[in-house]
Image (tube, helix red, strand yellow):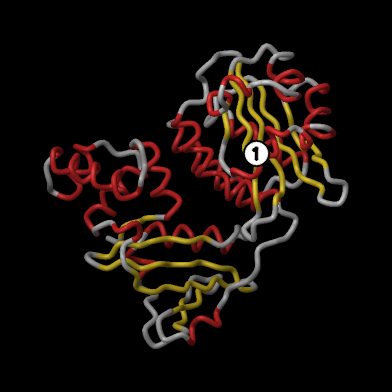
Amino acid sequence: MSAVTAARELRSLLRRHGSRTPGSAAAALDALTAVVPADCVSLSAWDPVKGKHRTLASSYPSTFTGFFDEEMQYDPLFVEVRANREPTRIEDIDPPRRHGPIFERVIHAGGFRDGLTYCLFAPDGRYVGMLNASAERGGTFDEDVVGLLDLLGSDFGAALDPVESTGAPTSRLHDGVTQGFLVRPDGARHPLTPGARPDLVDAAPALAAAVRRVGRGEPAEHLHLVERDTVHAVEVYASGRDVVVLHRRVPPPSGLSVREMQVLAGLAHGLTNPEIGEQYGIGARTVATHVEHVLAKTGCRNRVEAACHGARLGIALCR
């Protein structure tokens, strides 16, 4: 299983079960090992009243988790990491600044040569917890690992957040732009607006799968569906036992062309350039040129980052 595929499965796990309890957090960390090749990992929730963490699951020695829970929040390096909101590794810190409680109590004490902390936030911006990972081998947490963790960050944050996601914002159906339809548990579809496109469920397997997941009780999902030369921004929400699908036409995100979105969708599904070219009847060199344009427009540094970006956008193709 590729790391990108493992990350997708972990996202699904987090959306189904969350990670608010020790059991669900332990399951999430087990799945994380296929994405982050660490020797020790931990997932901690933040208690805003007590002003400290509570480790839900960990493979670190208990003395280390005690530090995470009681003292780590006071380390100036941690304060910076929390403010940056990005996965931060040892190599991201200037050598003269690699000291202090985190280094003395965890990294040096554990004989680790690589380490990473990722602070997690709820959709509304509240800090909800952190993910820590350490490895005995230096250079374990490369750019690919960081990119995949960045992809999973919002899902980990939502999974730790004690506030459940809200229902469907159907008030936007009156804005003259947003269209929508309802999907019943038996699969029947009922348009909510004159321009609703229930047929998108048949045209886009990714949307059909999202409707099934949300219908089983998983959190809301967001997709960008590419239908010939049109892009639909799609949101899928639960509403009681039914599922609400909202959609509207939008310009391609990140300034991409429709063809570049198709190529990005291929990257997000782990396809090679020849495989992408075969799918669209274009040469591998042409695909390579499109990939260069995708990297330039999205600011991604490599194919893995671009694949993560495509997965975050939920880019999917209509048949």
Q: Is residue 106 above or below residue 284?
A: above
Q: Is residue 61 left or right of residue 267?
A: right
Q: Amino acid at mark 1?
A: Glu
Identity of the residue drawn at 47% across and 73% down: 246
Residue 287 % position (x, y):
18, 43
Furthest-top residue in this view: 111
Pinpoint residue 72: horizontal percent, then vertical percent.
Answer: 77, 32
Q: Residue furthest front?
A: 96
Question: How far across and down, in percent of the image, does residue 161 sit?
Answer: 71, 53
Depth check: 36 or 115 in front? 115
Q: Residue at x 63, y 24 (%)?
A: 97
Quarter the N terminus occupies: top left
Q: Is residue 165 left or right of residue 307?
A: right
Q: Looking at this view, name the residue that lies furthest to the right.
A: 50
Q: Is residue 257 left or right of residue 1?
A: left
Note whether 73 is above or below 195 in the view shown.
above
Residue 191 in which image quadrant: bottom left
Q: Is residue 83 above or below residue 214?
A: above
Residue 41 placement: quadrant: top right
Residue at point 83%, 45% (across, down): 51
Q: Which structural element holds mark 1? A: helix
Instruction: Identify the residue position indicated by label 1 in the image.
Output: 80
Looking at the image, which is closer to me, 300 or 235?
300
